[in-house]
Structures are given as C-alpha cells and as structure tokens.
Image (cartoon, coloured by chain):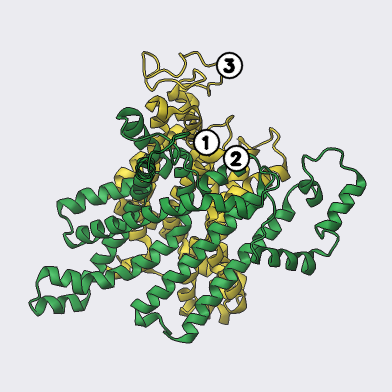
C-alpha cells in the first residue's frame, strides 16, 4: 500500500482511475475474487440480454413443451406445469432478479450513505435521532415489516400495468420496500468512518477558508468514504437478491415477470418437492446460490482491499 | 454490573419497542380505505348510521393524536391487538397463541443445535487454520450461508421425504391419526420435526461457524496467547481456557443481532414444511390480507427479537467487564 493510495486529499479523475485499476489488479490476485467476478459476469450477461440467448419469455400461450416433464430432447432442464421451458424461465429470471437487486441496492446504499454521512458529520441531537432510527431498523426483523409494507403500498399506488425501466409497478414496490428496510448497516459503517474523517486536518482547513457543511460533506467526506461504499454495495447486493427471492417465495412476486424466487414459489405451490420434480426448482435455486455466493466472495475480497481498518491490521 | 449500564440498555430496548408500536399505529392508518370501512369489510347493507356508529364505537371521531394513539398504546400493552379479519370473532391474540408453540419449539431447538455445532466447527477450523477441516468447513459454511433456507428445505424434502421416504412431507402431526399412547404421539411429532429442524440448523450453522472461526483467529494473535504458549501450556488447555472464552464474546452479540434476519428464514421454512407456526400464519394472513394478524405477528416477533438482544447485552455485560461503563 503506497502513500498515494492512502491519500486523504480529494483525488483527481486520473488518480481515481489509477486507484480503480489498482483495486482490480489486487482483486485479480485473489482466487476467490476471480471466481466471484467470473460468475457475476456470466449472470450479468444473461440479465442484460436474455432474448439473445433463449428468445422472448414464454407464456402459457406460447409454451409448447410437455407438461411438467423431466429433462428431455429440446428441454435440457425440463418444463413447468404450464409447458414452459425451464431454460427460458431461468434465464429470464436472471434479468428480473438482478434488476430488482441492482435497483434496491442503489436505493439502500443511497439512504445509508446519506444518513451515515449527515449523522456522523453533524453530530449532536441530529446524530442521536438518526442513530435511534438506524438501531431500530438494525434490530427489528425488517423482513416482516417488508411483508406488511409491500401489500399496503401496492394498494396505495394501485397495481395497474404501468412500468418503470421496463419493470412492472408491483416489482418497483418491492424495490422501494427493500430499499427502505435494509439501509441500516450501511449507515452505521459510513457514520463511523465519517466520525474519524471529520477530525482530520483537511476538514478544518476547508472550514477555515469558509466552506459550508454541505460543501465539506459532498466534496471532502464523500470522496473519502467511496471505498467503503463500494465494498459495502457488493454485500448489500447479495442481501437484496436474497430478500427479493424470499419476498417472492411467500407470494409477493409478479407471475408476469418471474424472478428466481417467483419460480421457486410456483414450484412449491405445484408441490414440486413432493412430486419429485427436482428440475422445477433446481435451476433457479442453483442460480440464486451461485449469485449470492459470488457476491459474498467479491464483497469479502473488496472489503479486505478497500476497508481502511482492515488494511491497517495487515 | 453498573446500574447506569443496566438503565441505558433497558431504556434503549424500551424506546425500540415503543417505535415498533408507533410503526404499527401508522401502518393501520396508512391502509387504503377509511378504518371504519376496513372494520366493517364484508358486512352487508352498511348504512350511514352503521358507519357512524362504528366510528363512535372504535373511537375514530377522537383526534388521532394524542387520543387515538394513547388508546392504541394502552390496548397493545394489555395484549388487545384487535380482531382477525378472516377468523371472524377471534382476537388476534388468540390466533397468535395457537401458533406460538410450534415456532418456539422449532426455532429454539434449531438455534441450540446450530450454536453448538457452529461454534465447535468454527473453533476447530480457526484453531487448525488451513487444515482439511478448515478448508472443507469454510467452503460448506459459505455455500450454506448463500442458500435461502426454504431452498435447503425443498432439497431436504425432495431427498429424504419424497425420495427415500424416511420422513413425512408436511405438518406437525399426521392428519387424522389417532394415537394408542402418548409415546406414539411423540414419535410421530419427532418424525415431522426432523426435516424442518435440520433445515433451520443447517441454515444457521454456516454463519455461526464463519463468525466463530474469524473470532478465534483474531484471538490467537493476541499477546496473552503468546504468553500462555511461552509458559509451556498444552495446546488443548490454551484453546479451552484462554482462547475460547474470549472468542465467544463477539459471537454472542452476532447471534443476537442476526436474530432479526433469522426470522425471515423461519417464516419460509415453516411454509415449505407446512409447519403450523407463526411463519405460516404470517403468510396465510398475507395471502388473505388479514392485516391485524400480520401486524400482530410483526409486533410479537419484533418484541421477541428486541428482548433477546437485551438479554444478550446483559449476558455480555456479565461476561466482559469492559463494557459495563
């Protein structure tokens, strides 16, 4: 670790690019990081262009396979009870699961970083108040809260066929609910880093030349917690994919845009485990485990590389 | 233990529980449709007079704050959570009471098994770092950690119930069965319990092992371990008397903090095995949009998790004198 990489001045675009390159190089040196990135690249490409690999999503009308059949010619992963090809379903499930995961992660990290920085920097009563709320979300079973919030918000916004970013409103509601229930640990991490940053000399210097709090937070604190935010984002993504899967599994998914969790829910309600229909839940199941596993690997590797606390211990 | 430490922890838990009740209060008012219509849902021939009577009867003509809120707070404190929409005439408390024991048994036992196995596996892997147990154990732990509980449950169900036929596929007791003796009943119950219990334990064991392993590794680099080694103590003694007690501390906190997440897994495992606990109740209530029951489940589970965290904090305070300030 060179001194320039640890620098606490505001990095220019060029040094930031170099730093990113350095991080990637360090990631490539770790076998678990490489495995994680390869898995994520694979599922990422499936999610970006599912039509390219398997054509449009099959519906009960366009499906042409046998009914709930084990793998046969032309249907390498079998079919579901609506005669749909499991390959088609699983690949399209990748898009829904990853898109919801990504959007929910953006919201989660945004709320978490905002509350963390403001709470840590402003301090005093604001800090005490925001941390009370953070602790509340940290302790309570947020999943059960999400279980209640989702149907209520859906009834409030109405569940028509409107779409946002090509995602149906029902799923946008899930994105928002995951976002507002899972930001607490991010806020905690960012706050503790902000607390130590605001005691540094460069914050005092900025204040002396007349910078306001808002300016210091966006231009001096934020660039220095970006590392932490990135490392945390990867772990939040894994959590978001898992939460979406679980919410869909208990019946809050959208059958018109099936995610992996939604497919698993369909498999359960058809009674696939009892019928021995392993091909119905094995493909989405394996995909979920691989994606979460890969995110955990990359997240742990990035945390080691980017987290200043861990770095100092080495 | 210092009284200020105790007072602060109690105050924190109290505020959190108050916030939970506030959230419940807001949620009921955020629901679409006015409260009196929600209450009279399904009642035929609702006249203006009946609506007005319902408003008066349920105190909806009073100001929302403080009157309605205080009434709500009082009702919650005395265990009056309202009536279920679906099970007409049954209070939410009664509905919850029927479902609480299956969950307590399943998750109490699951936690115990997972804590014992996870801590043992984690401690051994960390102690013999880089050895075969560490290598395999760490890999398995990571995969288990990435697997949703219900998926694990579906796989176990497929293999051991449908495939091998060793265990029944659903429920807590065989439907409609009559038992010759109490022992038969217990045997039937245990056969039904086996797979859900295995699912819960396996789902939890990975994260506990991971936490314990890193905690042991951190502890082993501390000076007092080097000192103990320098004094010529045996390996086993160092592990049991010096490393383990200290490495357990962070694990206690993590187990308590993780409880909130475990609840999500709990719900889905019960759904997979049709285990008649609070999890299946929550999903039934969700499907039927039975909000009072859903909120009751939220209240009950949240307060339990907060109290468990309080307990863990106090235990931690007893174990580690440094935090008692």
Q: Residue under circle 2?
A: A171
User: Do the residues at pointers 1 and 3 share their chain?
Assistant: yes
Q: Is residue A237 visible?
A: no
**Crowdedness near tag 1: few (<14), some (14–19) or many (≥20) residues, C-alpha within 10 Å:** many
**In the displayed structure, would residue B307 be above or below residue A63?**
below
Place of residue A254 in the rendered image (x, y in percent of width and height, measured from the top left): 58, 34
Assign the C terminus of chain B to one quadrant of the image: bottom left
Q: Secondary structure at mark 3?
A: loop
Q: Chain under label 3? A: A
Image point (37%, 78%), residue name:
B318
Chain letter of disc 2 in the image: A
What colour do you see for chain A? Answer: yellow
- Which class describes the residues within 10 Å of circle 3: few (<14), some (14-19), or many (20+)? few
First in residue order: circle 2 vs circle 1:
1
Q: Which residue is labeled 1 in the image?
A: A96
Q: Tell whether label 2 touches label 3 (CB within 8 Å).
A: no
Vertical side of A246 occupied by B92: above or below: below
Look at the numbered discs 2 and 1 and tell me whether their residues touch, using CB distance below 8 Å: yes
In the displayed structure, B54 sits above or below A1; it is above
Q: Is residue B241 left or right of residue B276?
A: left
Q: CA distance from mark 3 to mark 2?
A: 23 Å
Seen at 30% across and 68% down, the residue is: B248
Left or right: residue A171 compared with residue A72 = right
Quarter holding the N terminus of chain B is: bottom left
Query: In the image, which disc is placed on residue A61?
Result: 3
């Amino acid at each position: 670790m060179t001194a320039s990489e640890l620098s606490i001045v505001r990095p220019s675009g060029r040094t930031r690019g170099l730093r990113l390159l350095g991080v990637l190089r360090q990631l490539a040196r770790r076998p678990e990081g490489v495995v994680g990135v390869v898995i994520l690249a694979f599922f990422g490409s499936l999610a970006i262009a599912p039509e390219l690999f398997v054509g449009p999503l099959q519906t009960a009308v366009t499906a042409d396979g046998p009914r709930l059949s084990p793998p046969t010619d032309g249907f390498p992963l079998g079919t579901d009870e609506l005669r749909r090809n499991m390959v088609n379903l699983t690949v399209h499930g990748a898009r829904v699961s990853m898109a919801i995961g990504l959007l929910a992660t953006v919201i989660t990290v945004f709320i978490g970083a905002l509350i963390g920085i403001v709470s840590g920097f402003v301090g005093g009563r604001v800090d005490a108040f925001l941390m009370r709320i953070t602790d509340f979300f940290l302790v309570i079973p947020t999943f059960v809260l999400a279980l209640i919030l989702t149907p209520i918000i859906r009834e409030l916004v109405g569940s028509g066929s409107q779409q946002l970013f090509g995602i149906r409103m029902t799923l946008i509601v899930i994105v928002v609910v995951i976002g507002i229930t899972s930001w607490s640990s991010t806020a905690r991490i960012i706050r503790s880093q902000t607390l130590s940053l605001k005691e540094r000399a460069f914050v005092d210097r900025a204040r002396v030349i007349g910078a306001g709090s808002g300016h210091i937070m966006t231009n001096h604190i934020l660039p220095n917690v970006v590392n932490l935010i990135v490392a945390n984002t990867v772990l939040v993504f894994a959590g978001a994919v898992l939460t979406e899967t679980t919410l869909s599994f208990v019946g809050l998914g959208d059958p018109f845009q099936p995610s992996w969790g939604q497919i698993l829910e369909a498999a359960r309600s058809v009674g696939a485990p009892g019928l021995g229909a392993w091909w119905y839940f094995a493909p989405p199941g394996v995909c979920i485990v691989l994606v979460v596993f890969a995110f955990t690997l990359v997240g742990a590797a990035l945390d080691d590389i980017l987290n200043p606390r861990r770095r100092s211990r080495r | 233990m210092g009284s200020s430490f105790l007072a602060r922890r109690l105050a924190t838990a109290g505020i959190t529980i108050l916030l939970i009740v506030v959230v419940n209060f807001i949620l009921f008012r955020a629901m679409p449709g006015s409260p009196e219509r929600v209450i009279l849902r399904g009642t035929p021939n609702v006249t203006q007079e009946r609506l007005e009577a319902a408003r008066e009867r349920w105190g909806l003509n009073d100001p929302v704050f403080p009157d309605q809120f205080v009434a709500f707070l009082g009702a919650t404190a005395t265990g009056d959570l309202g009536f279920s929409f679906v099970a007409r005439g049954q209070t939410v408390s009664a509905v919850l009471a029927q479902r609480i024991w299956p969950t307590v048994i399943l998750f109490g036992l699951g936690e115990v098994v997972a804590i014992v196995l996870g801590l043992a596996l984690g401690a051994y892997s960390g102690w013999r770092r880089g050895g075969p147990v560490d290598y395999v154990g760490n890999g398995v732990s990571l995969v288990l950690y990435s697997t949703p509980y219900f998926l694990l449950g579906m796989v176990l169900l497929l293999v051991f119930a449908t495939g091998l036929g060793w265990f029944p596929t659903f429920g807590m007791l065989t439907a409609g069965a009559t038992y010759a003796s109490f022992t038969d009943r217990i045997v039937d119950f245990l056969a039904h319990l086996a797979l859900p219990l295995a699912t819960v334990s396996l789902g939890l064991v990975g994260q506990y092992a991971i936490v314990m392993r890193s905690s042991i590794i951190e502890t082993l680099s501390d000076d007092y371990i080097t000192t103990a080694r320098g004094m010529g103590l045996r390996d086993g003694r160092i592990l049991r008397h010096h490393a383990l007690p200290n490495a357990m501390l962070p694990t206690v906190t993590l187990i308590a903090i993780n409880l909130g997440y475990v609840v999500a897994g709990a719900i889905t495992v019960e759904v997979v095995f049709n285990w008649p606990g609070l999890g299946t109740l929550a999903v039934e209530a969700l499907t039927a949009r039975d909000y009072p029951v859903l909120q009751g489940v939220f209240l009950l589970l949240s307060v339990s998790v907060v109290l468990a965290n309080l307990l863990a904090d106090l235990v931690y305070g007893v174990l580690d004198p440094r935090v008692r300030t």
